Image (cartoon, grey):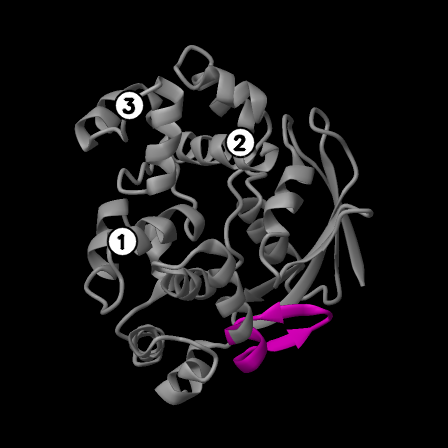
Amino acid sequence: MWTEKLQVQGPYNFDLVLERLSLDPLQVVDFTNRTVKVPLYIEKEPIVLQVQAMGNIDEPSFIIKGQSEVYKSKAIERLKKVFHWHQPLEGISRHFRESDLREIFEEHRGTAIVLDFDYYSCLVKCIIHQQLNLSFAHTLTERFVKTFGFQMEGAWFYPTPETTAQLQIEQLRAIQFSGRKAEYVIGLSEQIIHGHLNLEIMEKLSDQEVMDTLIKIRGIGRWTAENFLLFGLGRPNLFPKADIGIQNALKILYGLPQKPTQEEMESYSVKWAPYLSYASLYLWRSIEKRSEKK
């Protein structure tokens, strides 16, 4: 087993990261020890890392533990992107200090965009979550992973595209997938194993190129593609104007009598570029906190 300590520039609120991760029943989160187990694929090999926070918001540091030395450097580089350790949040916060979002950014200081652990599971999860309330979406995803995926060192891995492509629609309907959602997940997996879709090259494409590629696939629309860009690839400048949560947050922020129009949202967001993804995250967080206080 190897251990590595990383120092990260603050502000960074890892306790909030754990809080958000814990909403997903598949995540192995320990609040007492401030740890999470991270299942990764490095060069198609499954590995599990443990991330433990040791510092505070202003001086964050982390201890990373893994079993095999073989993929250590690549695994750490992946972790840096997943947890947004590769770019200090201070510069992003500074960008919003003179904006209409300054109070939200101050209240939720150190909130980071945390990516899904691999591209395929991100896209599958987005498809499963389509048009479902969050609680049942997590339940359905958990059933899918625990039925067809596998567990290693206490962490759960999604089934591979090869495994999912071999499933029958009836097997997914048995865990309460709709017939159409089952077709979408199996169809996506077939696209990957037959070489029609390469998720690994997506990081080299522009946002629009990724969008154009994904929406050609049955079952993937703009909402799913935008979520993949944001939580799969970590693109910094996404503002999904069709998202109901963002619309509700803006309605509250500006005291509007009804949800804002697309034109109003475009007008509000002009000055938030090139960090629209963080504007989206903090707007979501602003209404999540309101729900928690009720």
SS at mark 1?
helix
Q: CA distance from mark 3 to mark 1?
A: 36 Å
Q: Kindly identify which numbered label has been placed on residue 257.
A: 3
Residue position for label 1: 210
What amino acid type is highlighted by mark number 3?
A: Pro
Q: Position of residue 268 (x, y in %)?
A: 28, 21
Instruction: Let me know if residue 168 appears in the view.
Output: no
Q: Nearer the viewer, residue 270 or 80?
A: 270
Of badges 3 and 2, nearer the viewer stands 3
Q: Kindly identify which numbered label has been placed on residue 290.
A: 2
Q: Nearer the viewer, residue 31 or 198?
A: 31
Q: Which quadrant of the structure image shows residue 126? A: bottom left
SS at mark 3?
loop
Q: Which quadrant of the structure image shows residue 60? A: top right
Instruction: Let me know if residue 282 appears in the view.
Output: yes
10 Å neighbourhood of mark 1: few (<14), some, or many (≥20)?
Answer: many
**N-term mark: 1 or 2:** 1
**N-term mark: 3 or 1:** 1
Residue that sits furthest to the top in the current view: 98
**Left or right: where 6 falls relative to 147:** right
- Location of residue 274 with respect to 230 vertically, above or below: above
Q: Is residue 149 magenta?
A: yes
What amino acid type is highlighted by mark number 2?
A: Arg
SS at mark 2?
helix
Rendered residue at 33%/26% (across/down):
273
> Over which residues does the magenta segment extend?
144-158
Q: Position of residue 269 (x, y in %)?
A: 29, 24
- Location of residue 221 with respect to 264 vertically, above or below: below
User: Quadrant where the C terminus lies?
Assistant: top right
Of badges 1 and 2, nearer the viewer stands 2
10 Å neighbourhood of mark 2: few (<14), some, or many (≥20)?
Answer: few
What amino acid type is highlighted by mark number 1?
A: Val
